[in-house]
Image: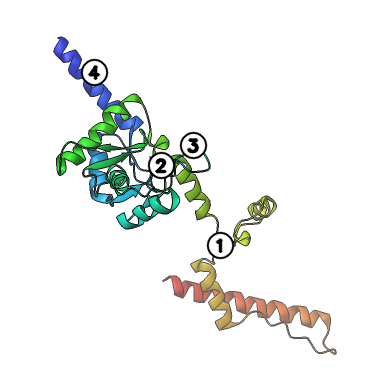
Amino acid sequence: MLLGFALSLTSCRKHRKRHTRPYGCTFPKCNKVFGSKNDWKRHENSQHFQLEMWRCRLTQSTGKQPCALVFWHRQVFDSHLEKDHQITSKTTITKEATECRIGRNGQSRFWCGFCRTILPLKNHGVQAWDERFNHIDEEHFKKNLRTTDWLCVEANKTKHDVMKDLDRKCFKDVPPAAIESDDEATTNDMSPPPADPPSDMETMSSNRVAEHGAPSRKRRRVHESPEAVRLDSQREMFVYCVGSNIVSNLWVY
């Protein structure tokens, strides 16, 4: 009975994760979240790739904030230490280059945006990548931390701020004319709907009128009496109506 209760509790927790989606992608400019650890791992393994880089951890000369600059080549990073931080010791430069290195695709050392530091890995290959996932899951995701608090190493900003800046850039180049004002939107909403296209019967009726002609509206001669004009008009209307009915019957049958 206790075993069944434990299994039921485990299944409830898994089902709840499908709704809360506690796992999120740790790469910048990707805001996807997942309901299972396997889905999260599969996404990062197939859709993203971690490049080798060096992140400076020394403090700036103007304050106590870390430099946090990112470099993609070892020589450029060494030059940065010599010029910007006045480090001349080759031993110190080698030590900083080793400890500040983020390995290619999570090898040797990896960046943890929750710990906000570079952590060493004990394993190699696929096991090292799994070790990284296990650290993020057990130390942070299971403690209800979300990727909005993850510090992106490239931008030195949290993912929340990165996505906010990305949204601003998306709307930066939109011309003002493309955005309607409230008055224009209200006017457009109150405008009458467009007229419906003519039906088939209306189109056929128009074609019949064009073919047989409408009742004549010629101006009568002045010497004709009004009674003669009235009778003539009635006679033309009668002929037109009879002709239209004949054509309509022929069209139907």
Give yes or no for contact between labels 3 and 1 (Cβ–Cβ under 8 Å). Answer: no
How far is disc 2 from disc 1 in space, using C-alphas? 71 Å
In the image: residue 76, left or right of residue 44: right
Disc on the earlier residue, 2 or 4 = 4
Q: Is residue 37 left or right of residue 250?
A: left
Residue 230 position in % (x across, y down): 77, 78
Residue 132 in the image: above or below residue 51: above
| Pointer 1 residue | 196
SS of the residue under disc 1: loop
The alpha-carbon separation of the residues under discs 4 and 1 comes to 60 Å
- First of labels 3, 2 by sequence position: 2
Q: Nearer the viewer, mark 3 or mark 1?
A: 3
Q: Mark 4 belongs to which amino acid?
A: Leu
Label 2 packing within 10 angstroms: few (<14), some (14-19), many (20+): some
Residue carrying label 2: 58
Q: CA distance from mark 3 to mark 4?
A: 48 Å
Residue 235 % position (x, y):
68, 79
Quadrant hosting residue 68: top left
Q: Are there few (<14), some (14-19), or many (20+) residues within 10 Å of tag 1?
A: few
Q: Residue at x 34, y 24 (%)?
A: 143
State the residue position of label 3: 64
